[in-house]
Image (cartoon, grey):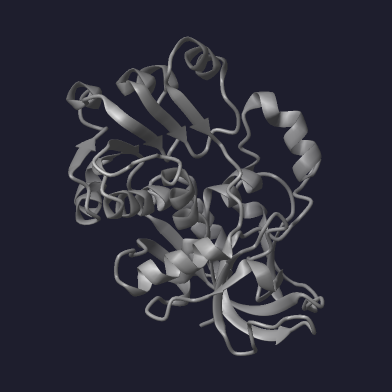
Amino acid sequence: MKAVICTQYGPPEVLHLTQLPKPVPKADEVLIKIHATTVTVADFRIRSFTIPKGFWLPARLSLGIFRPRNPVLGVELAGVVEATGKEVSKLKVGDAVFAEALNGMGAYAEYKCLPEKVVAPKPANLSFGEAATLSIGARTALHYLRKIKDIKDKKLLIYGASGSVGTYAVQLAKLFGAEVTGVCSTANLNLVKSLGADRVLDYTIGDFTNQLDTYDVILVAVDKWPFKECIRFVKDDGIYMNVTAPLKSFAMLGEAFKSKKKIIIGENVPVSVEDFNYLKELAEAGQLKPVIDRTYTLDEIVEAHRYVDKGHKKGNVVINVVG
């Protein structure tokens, strides 16, 4: 099968198209013919080894010393079931599905085997590319927002509201009844407003913090706003959430010790087919709409990573594996 491998840590050019053996499903697995995958922050970070200095050694031991231990990157996917293991009972050959590729990654390929229990039916009204983006971006936003008790009518600020997690967080927070302020760049103001945000602020013009209130919750979807500045705008009994920070910094630990503010960062979001099915229902009801910035083919994976490396993508970047 055709696949893209990461031969070493570095720039997009370390990604190379090659041929690998087609996998065979185990008893509890399905073989998925991948139609679409994406370029996520996880793919970028592993490929480039963009890791905080304090985590360099454990990350190398975990991911691979000289190159990724799992050379085929890609964590989001959607496709069609091509074969099933003998213990598979709910899915059948021909079913359109979406899933997360789990810790082994491997979605930058024509085929991927996954346990049936982590694979969900694709929303009927979404393309394969749109459906693939639900498995990480939408599920991450859902996970964090569910940690907010009595979210209805609470004041929520989303920093990085135009990214993958951010665009889903805006939509879900409004669906749950929150008052949402989105922060993004000039080019994305209309996009974030169209997703339902009550107020949208441009961080590129002057000091945007002069326009801020205090908030019940601040959700940082793009880790480019210093914690010491951000935390000033969280209410005394409020919540600071950062979906990308791996561990609490000394400043975060200090704030948690001296105040009642709750700090939630870098949690491992468990895979849940129940969550996948819930997101499917929202998408089919028109209440959750994927934002697709650009679409590339698997042959154009280097170009796709170059674009994502610039750090300005809107929503999601999709890779079409079929067609």
Q: Is residue 235 positioned above or below 118 on the image?
A: above
Residue with the most extreme front position: 150
* Residue 217 against residue 27 in the figure, above or below: above
Q: Is residue 315 left or right of residue 243?
A: left
Q: Give above or below for 119 relative to 14.
A: below
Q: Is residue 150 left or right of residue 304?
A: left
Query: At 44% from the left edge and 56% from the top edge, which residue is drawn?
Result: 138
Which quadrant holds residue 272? bottom right
Instruction: State left or right for residue 158 relative to residue 147.
Output: left
Residue at 49% x, 39% y is 243
Name the residue nearer the viewer: 35 or 277. Answer: 277
Relative to 79, say whether 314 is above or below.
above
Question: Where the N terminus falls, by quadrant?
Answer: bottom right
How far from the left and from the top, in percent, is residue 180?
A: 25, 42
Spot occupied by residue 120 in the image (x, y as percentages of width and height):
56, 72
Residue in view at x 46 percent, y 70 percent: 131
For the point 63% across and 83% down, which residue is it? 91
Q: Quadrant of residue 75?
A: bottom right
- Front-lying residue, 298 or 189: 189
Residue 307 visible from this viewpoint: no
